[in-house]
Image: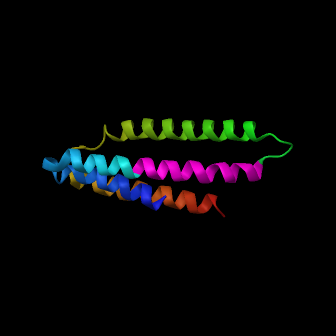
Amino acid sequence: MAAYNLSMWIEVTTLMFPQFFLLIASVSNTMKNICFLLASASRARINLNFARNNNMADIQGKSVSQFTASTLAGTVMGMALTSFIDVSKLSQIVPCFLALTAFQLGLVHVSTK
């Protein structure tokens, strides 16, 4: 999760270095896709632990549905947030990014206990 957040931070830095937008965005997206692949591989093993009576397909389907729902909810909240902040100013994006990242990592920590 920390690597994914780091890749998102790299994406935010495109505002600091607009002349390197394509390079920075490419590196960030590559890192995010690597994180997604690693998460997918480990998620299959975790889901296998929840499977009872050979119902792996049900568990996997619910896992994907939960991931999709949380991603869509995050997108909607992000869109709502952009009406309150100026997304072209780092002075407004950085505090929001740091607060939301800390909140997300806190939720992940709490949910793994």
Q: Which residue lies furthest to the left in this view?
A: 19
Asked whether, in this view, residue 4 is left or right of residue 42, the answer is left
Q: At 31% across and 57% down in the image, what residue appears?
A: 95
Q: At 29% across and 56% down in the image, what residue appears?
A: 94
Asked whether, in this view, residue 90 is left or right of residue 65, the answer is left
Q: Which quadrant is home to the C terminus?
A: bottom right
| Residue 8 spot, x, y in % from top left | 36, 52
Magenta region? 32-50
Residue 84 visible, this angle: yes
Magenta span: chief secondary structure = helix
In this rendering, the answer to whether 67 lies above or below 20 is: above
| Residue 54 spot, x, y in % from top left | 83, 41
Q: Which of 85 and 32 is in front in this view?
A: 32
Q: Nearer the viewer, residue 67 or 34?
A: 34
Q: At 43% across and 47% down in the image, what residue appears?
A: 33
Residue 93 visible, this angle: no
Q: At 73% across and 49% down in the image, what residue appears?
A: 48
